[in-house]
Amino acid sequence: MANGTIAEHAKSFYEEGTSKKTGLLGWFFSTDHKRIGIMYLAALSTFFIIGVILALFMRLELIAPGETLMDAQTYNTIFTLHGVIMIFLFIVPGIPAIFGNFFLPLMLGAKDVSFPRLNLLSFWIYIVGAILVVISLFVPGGPIDTGWTFYIPYSVRTGTNVSLAIFAAFVLGFSSILTGLNFITTVHRLKAPGMGFFKMPLFVWSTYATAWIQVLATPVIGITILLVIMERAFGIGIFDPSLGGDPILYQHLFWIYSHPAVYIMILPAMGIVSEIIPTFARRTIFGYNAIALSSLAIAFVGYLVWAHHMFTSGMSDTARIVFSFLTFIVALPSGVKVFNWVATMYKGSIDPQPPFLWVMAFIVLFSIGGLTGLVLGSLATDIHLHDTYFVVAHFHYVMFGGTGTIFFAGLYYWFPKMFGKLYHTKLANIGVALFFVAFNLLYFPKFIMGYQGMPRRYYDYLPEFADLQLVSTIGSWLMAIALIIVFGNLIRSLRTGRKATSNPWGGVTLEWHTTSPPPLENFETDIVVTHDPYDFSQLEDMKNE
Amino acid sequence: MQDGHSNEEHSHVTSYGTLVIIWLALLGLTSITVTVAGISLGMYTLFVAMFIAAVKSALVINIFMHIKFEDPIFKVFLLVSALTLLVIFVLTFVDFSFR
């Protein structure tokens, strides 16, 4: 793909920073996109683990009917915190913040993002937002108990610390906007010579589409949050019908952001899938243009469907029909991607390494999540399933089975590049397999319970749900073990792993044309792009680089 | 950089006369908004107010914020944002207008 040479003895970005400061300060003040990506990885993984621990407590409470571990208010607080942490602190920033930061410039053949200092600012704004969430737990009033959607009127009436917690989400939004702005500019301005838009790797395409959503949709949640805070503080009546307001307006505003945000979460994951499959099938991606443009299509159509979250809210019948119809359109570009991935594997020379296995898990789990989404997007069936466990199951299949799985796929794919170390392959395979079993044990019963009428967010349930709740809780324990193996393998490898070569998987995109880990400015020589992104004929040349 | 964009300054200078005319136009449009708010136009009130606001925004963005004199790529970006906003408005009114 490129002309350039690898100088094996160059200093890596771990050994050479952007500032004169050393130690932790050298990291905290570093404007190097790779260091910032790794700082995000550390911060996001921490919050992910906290979210998992909260979920384990929830599942433990639900192991049997009645009070087992905590009272109802504590349960409300824990599921809200689980949602807020997982959504706003892990999965929304997630892949763009970690892998986007680390790999976008590398894949473009650039030395850094367009605005490195703004990038560092984004990271610290994220940290400030996270600290505000933590503070909101401990100040008088108590932790927020509204669910992560902060629905009116309860979020205005409850005495818990709603204002501070949602202000944290407001602050986190700025981090997201600035990252998006940075990525859009980087893609337009810093592509290496020879790289046009249609020679960009597909992860870059999906990150680019995501960046547009971050910039255009996030301000809507910012304004909405300010309105809720004003409503709580001054009773201005925007959402209060007795003062001429409209409570459904809140749901519109919230989902105008939060539905596109679902695509902020999943699009970058789809980009990683499009990287991993060609590498491990040793075959150029099938339908490059279709996959690239379907990312933009998903980003656009994502704006047209938000009110499918509101079919039972009391909005007009016309709107319900229009939004239900529009929702089905999302399946088209998503289907384009899935079929193209499968077609890429056809007659490929498949090497089932751990990242590839994660992707296989993703395709199964995400397809289940996506198709059950159509059940919910269909107006008539949604009336029955709305606010039941079916929604919880669908959401976790899409978000955790989709984005979460690909977070691990990305980590296992790029770990050698990021840290210069190889992990234990057999243990990695066990991790994926156990994850897959645990995942289905944990979440599939929720589809059945939801269909049978088990409402979401309930602290207690009828005895008839006890067996499936127990299965789900056992699934959560297995999931915990799987995650310990998945993370443990990587952490262990940081210390004891074998040294990785510059291209352990035989990938051909630009990040594999430099050392593992890369030097401070990514490449020792200027990059000139001469091949298509997934042209595997260059592998032989790369061995000689 | 390879897109052919460069970072040289856009040295377009808008004359004071134009700036004053735009300023007066904005003041005029503001007074129309205030006047219209006092007249009962039923469901059209909002659309009239939105239309006037859109014209005012266009003037500010084009002249004061120099978009008129910028590279086409920035106009495309702005257009994408404006269209998104329009789509959001239209779809919200699919609910509001038919309740």
Image: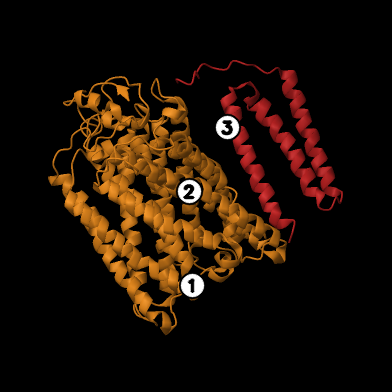
Chain colours: A orange, B red
State the image quarter where residue A477 is shown: bottom left
Q: Let me know if residue A145 appears in the view.
A: no
State the image quarter where residue A397 is shown: bottom left
Q: Earlier in the sequence, mark 2 or mark 1?
A: 2
Judge whether A534 appears above or below A304 on screen: above
Q: How far is disc 3 from disc 2 in space, using C-alphas?
A: 28 Å
- Residue at the (72%, 38%) spot, across then down: B54
Badge 3 and badge 2 both on one subunit = no
Using a 10 Å C-alpha cutoff, classify the residue at mark 2 as few (fewer than 14 neighbours), some (14 to 19) or many (20 or more).
some
In front here: A408 or B1?
A408
Q: How far is disc 3 from disc 1 in space, using C-alphas?
A: 44 Å
Q: Looking at the image, how many numbered discs can be counted on the residues?
A: 3
Q: Residue furthest front?
A: A347
Using a 10 Å C-alpha cutoff, classify the residue at mark 3 as few (fewer than 14 neighbours), some (14 to 19) or many (20 or more).
few
Q: Circle 2 — which element?
A: helix
Dot 3 falls on which chain? B
Judge whether B27 appears above or below A240 on screen: above
For label 2, the residue is: A335
Q: How far is disc 2 from disc 1 in space, using C-alphas?
A: 25 Å
Q: Quadrant of the C terminus of chain A?
A: top left
In front here: A508 or A521?
A508
For label 1, the residue is: A451
